[in-house]
Amino acid sequence: MRIDVVSIFPEYLSALDLSLIGKAREQGLLQLTVTDLREFTADRHRTVDDTPYGGGAGMVMKPEPWALALDAARTRGPAAAGAPEQRPVLVVPSPAGEVFTQATARELALREHLVFACGRYEGIDERVVEWSREHFEVRPMSLGDYVLNGGEVAVLAMVEAIGRLVPGVIGNPESLVEESHAEGLLEYPVYTKPALWRDRPVPEVLLSGHHGRIARWRRDRQLQRTAARRPDLVAALDPAGLDRADRDV
Ligand code: SAM
């Protein structure tokens, strides 16, 4: 998979050199390039923003550098033109976007080329988004219902969530199967050694070695935890995916 990120703070993205994403880049599983938007400015001050038409507070990101930066990112990808499903995806982080979920991560992990456009100030001139639709599948994406100072933190989260689903990035793919949001539920509580810590024992069933009982205990805890913390997820469960014991929880 190829990932391009455009930002006025490229150093913000240096966390993507670390840990599993950093290793995946070293192994060539992910090709990731971070570009400074200011490289695409033509004036002495490397200006990327200007005052908003219509007035109001704050500054808006100018369209010209964005168009040049996105053209450069697009042509770095494997299939710049062609059928819509082969087009690069342009993710535009925005609190006014569709909320990014595990389902979005799964969907985007299947694509060949993702480009992320990190906004700052009051955001990017809207015409950039409109123009980009000629070349990209454009996805305005929100990390959640709150406002950040820029798109970089959102991109770090999205690239990590997507990147860990790319085959080979996580050593043991089994660990992706049971985690929170894999099947619409939150994960069960987890424990490690020692079996007794500060008078708190590990639940006895986990020491039993009885796979069936452990699986049932974990499933019950998943259902209870999800009902307590995220009733919206329980309401969205497909009843056909629940067995009789599930319904009793
Ligand atoms: N004026 C914009 C609005 O009210 O929708 C907010 C602009 S915000 C201060 C600057 C940039 O931060 C946005 O262009 C976007 O790139 C990023 N950003 C802020 N909150 C975000 C969120 N919840 N999810 C994704 N990106 C966000």
Image: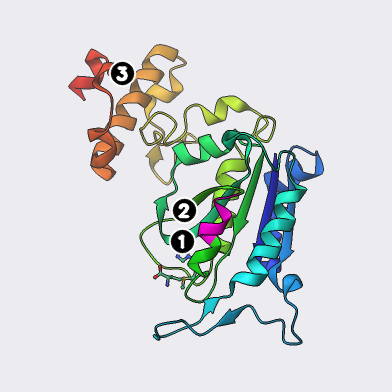
Q: Is residue 116 left or right of residue 196?
A: right
Name the secondary structure under disc 2.
strand
Q: Which mark is residue 241?
A: 3
Looking at numbered disc 3 in the image, what kind of residue is underneath it? Gly
Mark 2 CB within 8 Å of ligand 1: yes
x, y percent for residue 30: 73, 42
Q: Which mark is residue 74?
A: none
Q: For the point 24% across and 16% down, which residue is it?
A: 245
127 or 70, which is in the foreground? Answer: 127
Looking at numbered disc 1 in the image, what kind of residue is underneath it? Ser
Q: Which residue is mark 1?
A: 94
Q: Are marks 2 and 1 in contact (CB under 8 Å)?
A: yes
In magenta, the rendered stretch is 129-134
Mark 1 CB within 8 Å of ligand 1: yes
Q: Quadrant of residue 236?
A: top left
CA–CA distance in space, label 2 to label 1: 6 Å
Q: Quadrant of residue 68?
A: bottom right
Looking at numbered disc 2 in the image, what kind of residue is underneath it? Met
